[in-house]
Image (cartoon, rainbow, N blue to C red):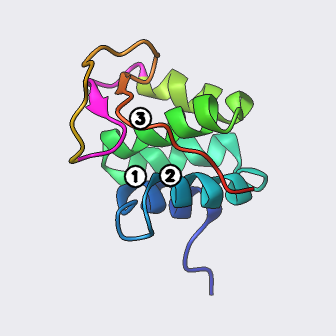
Amino acid sequence: MKVSSPEFTALDLVCFQDSIGGLNRLATLLEELAEVIDAIRLVETAKRFGQITSVQRLGYMLEKVLKYKEKTEPLYEWLKKQNYFPVLLQPGKKAKNKRTNNRWKIIKNASPQSDL
């Protein structure tokens, strides 16, 4: 019986980043998952996930931090049709600068790095 998918797991990890050890741990886990994430299934999963902020953060992490832009193109095409707003990369941490210089509308208030 299939309980989850790489795409759902990735969104879930983003949603619960504090519980798994923070952004660096998230980056490491996403880097491991990225190889098996299917871009089209990611969009379908995001539509059902219900948290646009997690979709934004995942897209940003995959594209900007881990350099898997090809995995994010369909996701961004779907996201740009949604009503979404600027969001902190790391919730609960203050940001010096509230500008978003990326298409995901992520306010970069941390600099995550993968351990791989």
Distance CA(mark 1)–CA(mark 2): 5 Å
In the displayed structure, 89 sits above or below 92; it is above
Q: CB of mark 1 within 8 Å of CB of mark 2?
A: yes
Residue hosting label 1: 48
In this view, the residue farthest toward the right is: 35
In the displayed structure, 37 sits above or below 70; it is below
**79 or 28: nearer the viewer:** 28
Q: Position of residue 22 (x, y in %)?
A: 42, 59
Q: Amino acid at mark 3?
A: Gln
Image position of 64 (left or right of 95): right
Q: Earlier in the sequence, mark 3 or mark 2?
A: 2
Residue hosting label 3: 56
Q: Position of residue 64 (x, y in %)?
A: 59, 28
Image position of 86 (left or right of 104): left
At 63% from the left and 25% from the top, the residue drawn is 73
Q: Which residues are magenta?
A: 80-91
